[in-house]
Image (cartoon, rainbow, N blue to C red):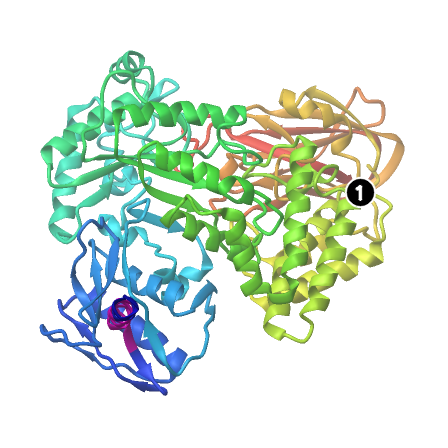
Amino acid sequence: MKKYLFLFSFLCMGSLLSAQVQLTRSGKPVSRIVITEKSEVNQKAADLLQLFIERISGAVLPITADQKIKRGDVSIGGTAAGAGEDGFRLLTQDGALFIQSGGDKGAIYGVVTLLEDYLGVSYYAYECYTLNKETDITVPALDRTETPAFRYRQTFSYGNDDPIYKMWFRLEEPGEMFIDNMWVHTFNRILPASRFGKEHPEWYSFINGERRPGDHSQWCLTNPEVLEACIHQLDSIFAAHPDLKMISVSQNDGNNTNCACPECRAVDEYEGSPSGNFIHFMNKLAEHYPDKEFSTLAYLFTMQPPKHVKPLPNVNIMLCDIDCKREVPLTDNASGQYFMQALEGWSKISDNIFVWDYGINFDNIVSPFPNFHILQKNMQIFKDHHATMHFAQVNGIKGGDFSEMRAYVLGKLMWNPYQDVDSLMQTFMKGYYGDAAPYLYQYQKIMEGALLASGKDLWIYDSPITHKDGMLNRNLRKIYNELFDKAEAAVKNDAEKLYHVQLSRLTLQYSELEIARTETGGDVEGIKKQLELFQERTRTFGVKSLNERANAPEAYCELYRKRFLPQEVNSLAAGAKVTYISAPDKKYQPIADKALTDGLYGGTTYVESWVGWEGRDASFIVDLGEQKTFSRIETDFLHQLGAWILLPKGGTYSVSQDGEHFDDFGSFTFPEDRDNQVKFVPGVVDSSTPVKARYIKVDIQTIGMCPPWHYGVGYPAWFFLDEFSVY
C-alpha cells in the first residue's frame, strides 16, 4: 500500500512541476515570448514582460512570432474564455504559459498581474517601483481568469505621463475610447456658436427671455433643424474616424443654461427633468447610428432621470456627483442622498452608466483632503447600480494631497472595488514611504477621525480655513507636524523616501500658511520662514500648480509676501465702519460689517472673507472715524471664472466731510478678462493732490449677465470684494 501511495505522491509532484514554467536559469533565458496574434496590444504586453524579466534577472527573453508553442514558452494571444473586455486568462498547460485576452488591453493586464502577483514586482507611483532580484524565475501552476469591474477606468494622475504606470494601473484615456477625443461638453465643438449662432440663434437656448447663443449655451433640442445639423456634423466626424464607435454628444459646461422655449419647457415638465429633452434627442441619434454609442451627461441640471423616456442601449449616461460633500459615503449625507436618488433612478432605466466622481479639493489641491475612508464604499455603490465606466477625477498634480497614494488606491479599486482599502493604503505606504509609513498612516487616521468629529463638510471647493477649528485646529496641527518630523527622521538616510515624505508634507505646510493669513498677532518671522521653505520645496520638487486654475506656487509665495504679510504702510481705513446702501447677498451679510476693513485679505476661495453681490450694483459708505488725509483709494476684487465670479465694469469713489455731501474722487474700470486663473485685482484711484475727508462712498457697477463665452451665459454674474484700503 505504501508503495502505491509513494507512486501517487510522486506522480502528483511531477504533474505540479510540469505545470510550472521556468523563464530564466542562472540569469540566462530558457524561455521565449511568443506573440501568436500580431497586434499593438500584444506587442506592448510582450515588451512589458521582457523588460521586467530583464530587470529582475538580467536575462532578455527573445520575442518571436510563432504559431507552434513549445514547452517553456510564454504565449501571448488567443481569446480568454469567460473573460470580458480588458479581462485576461493566465494558464499554464503542457509546460507553457498562456496569456489570453478577453478583448482590448487584456493581454497587457494579464502580464501586469503575472508580474505583480507572482514575480514580485510592485509599482507605486510615477517611475517608482520595487522588485526582487532573482536569477532563476519560475512561474507556478496557474489558471486565473479576471474581468475588471468597469470597462473604462480613468484617473487624473501625473503618473499617467509614465507609460508603464498607465498600463500597470490599467488606466485609459478618453482618446482611446471616444471618437476625436470628444468625451464631455461637446455641444459647442459639434455646433460652434461662433460659427452658427449669428445665422441660427434659434438653435441655442432661450434663457431669461431671449435666445443666447454662446460657447456655453445649450441647444434647443426640440428644434428639428438642430438634429439635422448635428447629424450633418457627425457624418463628417464618423467618416474621419472609422476606428472608434463611441462619442460624447453632451451639454456644455454651466448650470441651468438649458433651453426654456415653450416646446422645450413642455418636454421638461412632462418628463419631470431637463434630462428628458436630452434623452429624447440622444435616442434619435442612437436610432440613426445603431452601430455607434452616444455618451451624454447627467450633470447639474440634467442629473435627475426623466420619468417616461428610457435611454436606448447604445446611449451611455455619464452621471456626475459634483455637488456632493465628501466627508461620508454618498448614502450618508443630504447632498449624497440626492445623488443616490438620481443614481437609483438611472439604474432602473439603463445598464449603461458612466459615473464621474470627484475626489479632491479643486480650489486648493495642495491641501489636506482626508476621504480615503469613503472611496471603496462609493465605488461599490457605483458598481452595484449598473455603472460600467468610471472616472475618478482627483486632478492629480505633483504636491497634491497624497496624490500618489490616492491614484494607487483608485486604480486598484476600479479594477476590483471589493478589495480592502485599508490594506491597499498600508501596502502602498510601506513600499513608497518605507520606515516612515507608520507615522503617515497615523497622520491619515487622526485627521480622518478629526474630520468626522468636527461635523464639517468636506467639499471639492473647500478652503483649509474652513477646517481651522476642526481637523486643522492648532493642537492637531502640532500633532501632525510631530508625526511628519518622526517620518522624516525615520528615512533621513534614504533620499528617495525622504523626498516622498517631504512631498506629502506640502499640503500641511500650505494649510498652515493659509490659516496664518486669517489671524492677527502671529509670529510673522516664523511665517516668513514657513513661506520660504514652502517656496523652496515646491520649486525643488517641480510642483506646478496649487489648484485646477493653474495658479503656480512661485506666484502664490510672492503674492503672499505682498498681500498677506504685514506691510510697512498701513491702510487708513483699518477698522473703519462700513454702512451699506446696497447690501451684499444674504449669505455674505454676517461678515460684511467687518470683512472689508479688518486688514485681512481673502484668498483664492470665495467661501472665506469675501463679500459678494449677484447681478446687482454695490454701494456703501466707509466712515474713517475722523478726518484723514490721503491720496489713494483701492478696493480688492476677486476674479474666478469657474465660480461665475467676474470683475465688475468698474467703480466710483467720492469723499465727504459730513457724510451727506460727497465730491468725486475718481473712478476705475476693468477690461474683460477671460483668463481661467484665479486673480486678485485692485480697483485703484490715485489723486494728484492729497484729499482730506472722513467719509468715502463706494459705488460698484456690475456687468449684469454673464457674457456669451462664459459658463453662466444668460444668468447674473457675481462680483466679490474684500479689503477696502486708503493710503
Residue at coordinates 64% horizontally, 42% vertically from top-left? Answer: 448
> Who is closer to the viewer here, 669 or 572?
572
Residue at coordinates 76% horizontally, 40% vertically from top-left? Answer: 725
Above or below, comparing residue 566 to residue 670 in the picture: below
Q: In which quarter of the image is residue 648?
A: top right
Above or below, comparing residue 140 to residue 697 in the picture: below
**Left or right of 305: which side holds 243?**
left
> Who is closer to the viewer here, 481 or 522?
481
Q: Residue at label 1?
A: 519
**Magenta region includes residue 520:** no
Can residue 216 be spotted in the picture? no
**Left or right of 241: which side holds 586?**
right
* Quarter of the rendering occupied by the N terminus: bottom left
Q: Quadrant of residue 495?
A: bottom right
Q: Give the range drawn in magenta.
A: 8-22
> Who is closer to the viewer here, 51 or 199?
51
Regarding mark 1 in the picture, which secondary structure is present there?
A: loop
**Left or right of 224: which side holds 375?**
right
Q: Where is residue 193 drawn, in percent x and y?
A: 28, 37
Looking at the magenta stretch, what is its main secondary structure? Answer: helix
Q: Where is residue 545 drawn, in percent x and y?
A: 55, 56
Q: Where is residue 271 drawn, in percent x and y?
A: 28, 15
**Left or right of 573: which side holds 711?**
left
Q: Where is residue 701 drawn, in percent x and y?
A: 58, 29
